Structures are given as structure tokens and as C-alpha cells.
Image: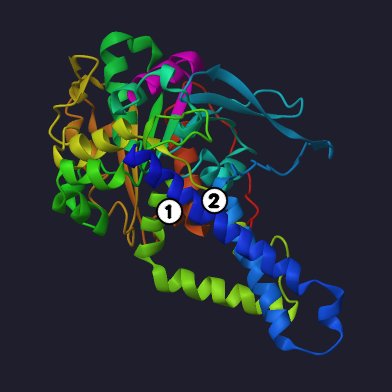
Amino acid sequence: MKYMMTYDLMESMRNTNQWLGSTARAFASYPVMSWGANPAIDWLKAWGEVTERTFARMVAKPDWNIPVQTGHDGTDMVVTTEKVVEKPFGDLIRFRVGNRPDRSRKILLVAPMSGHYATLLRKTVISLLPDTDVYITDWHNARDIPVSAGKFDIEDYTLYLMDFMREMGPDTHVLAVCQPVPLALAATAYLAELDPAAQPRSLTLIGGPVDPEANHTEVTDFGRSVTMGQLEETMIQRVGFKHAGVGRMVYPGLLQLASFISMNAETHSTAFRDEIIRVAKGEASEHNRHNAFYDEYLAVMDMTAEFYLSTVERIFKGREIARNEFVVDGHKVDFSKITTVAVKIVEGEDDDISAPGQCLAALGLLTGLPDSKKAAHLEPGAGHYGIFAGSSWRNNIRPLVLDFIDANSDRPRSKPGKVVSIN
């Protein structure tokens, strides 16, 4: 019961802060407060507005909000999402662009399950839509999944990816971003043994921890410094009665968010201080850069306890992927079985989450793959976010990825179109 009380305490604290912000904003908005000039009231209203929005978006799943695409004839085509495969812990969804004919490039974008929703890759999706048909793994918030649905760990995650790849067929090109990189590699290797015809054409691995020990970061140092018992005791909580997943053991999104913010606390404090100042001066807007970023960054989801713990124990501590000792459903996965799938590695020079070398280690595992089907790119000056959603991605990495896809497809593809910068 103590785990459930802690979970509800965190939610109560979040709810209280949201209420305090709302109350301050409402109080400062009373007409009587305008009878005399009082800058303190303007500051109180600004603080309340920013605080209310900040804590409210922590429990709301963001919408995709993909902009309308323009057809060759100048018509506007609305982008909608379609569920292709539905599963308890995550769906495979496709982005439909009006009545546009299918593109020759078909991409499976594997989103991370690391505390944020798949919408974290919204800008990646937008940049790929003009030239490709985009599918994405849409993982569910663990607090909304009944206990009766069973467990979900890294083995189940791998099996989900295999099912999604089978559904999409062999013309698929997989792009895995961050956390799922080693598991996407494992899913491909397992398919190479069980169902070779279902393997994707290519696999692009972007900034993921294939071998966390290849280059240490604050994330890997944390994983090495704590025991599994300490993690289970301090990080795992039980979902409260407010949610459909009541009783499920989870690693709460709010706890993960606190960890994210603590890594760059000063930067975040400055950002919120500046936003309060802009609101007080009347210089802020609904969709300014601050809101656009934090609407997504602060929206967090719970992970199942078994997924979080197995990731730390088997990927980071045991290095099962790096040592080619990963077991799925009782079967040892052999990465040397990948012999036909082209693999490209993308890393950022300044990535402080998955530092250069961690993802590159994947190529060393592919002993059965010819060197002609291996490629790697290190983006100068790029951080973790920039290699899949920033200007480095749009201007440099995306064209390289599409060229790699074209070079490893059975039929020629059209040249990539120009991507418009999205702020």
C-alpha cells in the first residue's frame, strides 16, 4: 500500500500546484484588481497562468497536430491517424495524408518508451511525411492499462516490434530513435531466424544505447551506481484508484520528469522565469517557442515496472545486447543472423544521453552482414534531440537517411523534397 500512497501523493502535489496557479490567475483577474495600478497583480497573474499550464500538461497526452499537407495540384490534404494494429500496451498507427497515393518509401518510426509519448517525434514525422508513408509505434500510458492485461517488459516490447514489422511487410524501412535502438536491432535479428521474409529492407539506428559502456554519460553512471533493489524500492510505485490501471506497478512519469529536469535544472528555471516575465509584459503568445517545447516535454507517461527494471538490469547493467546474450521468449537472439538488412548508425557529437560510440557498437555485432550494407554518421555539434528533430536532422541527417533508404530499396525512389523549418 505504501507504493500506492506515494503515487497518489505525487499526483496530489501536481494537482495542488495546478490549483494554486489557477487560483492565482483567477484572483488577479478580478475587475476590482484593476482599480489601481499595481504591478504585483500583473506578476501574480503571469505566475498563475504559467504555473497552471505547466502542471496541467503533465497529465495530458499531446495531440499530433500534423499540419495540412499541400498536394501537387495545390489542394490541402488533411493528415489523420489510422490504427493498423491495436495491442494492450501500444498500437501501430499510420499517418494518412488525404487521398494521396501511397509513397514508394514506407517507414516504421519506432518511438522511445522512456517517459514521453510518441508525439515527442512529431517534428520527425512532419519532416518525413512529404516523401514517405510514415507509421509509428504509439505506446500507451501504463497507468491506463488494467492489471489483467499482464506484464510488459523488454522482451514483450521486442515481440511487439516483430509483430509490427510483419504487419507492414518486407518493403519496410525501420527508424529507431534512442531507447528502442537495441530492441529494434534484436527484433530484426530474431525475425532473421524465425521469419526472414518479414525482415525490413533497412534499419536506421539513431542515438541509442546498444553498448552503454562504450562511452559513459550521466545516465550510464546512474545505472552503474545503484543496485536493482535500490531502484525497485525508490523508483517503483503502484497506480492509485483514480486510473484504470489501479494496482499496476509502474515507474511514474512524474518521477521520470523530475529526473529529466534535474539534469538541466538551471536551464529550465531560467526558461520559466523568462516566460513569466513575457506573460507579465504581454509579450507571450499561445504557441511561442516556450509553450511549443514544454507542452511536449512536460507531458509524461508511466512505464510498467518490469519494463523499466528490465531495461536497467539487462541493457545497462548486464549489457546483454552488447554481449550478444539477449534472450527473448526463451530464445537466445543471434545478431550474426542479420545478413541482408542494411544498417545505418546516426549519432550526435554532443549527445549527453547516448554518447557517441554507444550506438555505433551495433555494427560490431553484425558479423554476418557485409560491410557494404553498413553505414555510420556522426553529426558535428548535435545533441540528443537535434539528431532526430532539430535543424541537424532536417538539414543534414534526414537527406542522408532517405538516400540510405533509396540505396537499399528494390526499386528507384523519387528525390527527397525540401523540408520547411518548423518552430
Sequence-wise, which precedes: disc 2 or disc 1? 2
Label 1 packing within 10 angstroms: few (<14), some (14-19), many (20+): some
Q: Is residue 248 left or right of residue 134?
A: left
Prevailing SS of the magenta stretch? helix
State the residue at coordinates (58%, 18%).
84
Find out whether the residues at labels 2 and 1 contact each other: C-beta distance under 8 Å: yes
Q: Which residue is mark 1?
A: 257
Q: Is residue 241 visible?
A: yes
Quarter of the image with the C terminus in it: bottom right
Q: Is residue 124 visible?
A: no
State the image coordinates of residue 241 (x, y, percent, origin top left).
Answer: 49, 33
Which region of the structure is painted magenta?
158-173
State the image coordinates of residue 169 (x, y, percent, origin top left).
Answer: 48, 15
Q: Is residue 19 found inside the magenta-colored segment of the image?
A: no
Residue closer to the observer: 257 or 339: 257
State the residue at coordinates (47%, 23%).
146
Q: Quadrant of residue 367?
A: top left
Amino acid type, label 1: Leu
User: On screen, 257 above or below 181?
Assistant: below
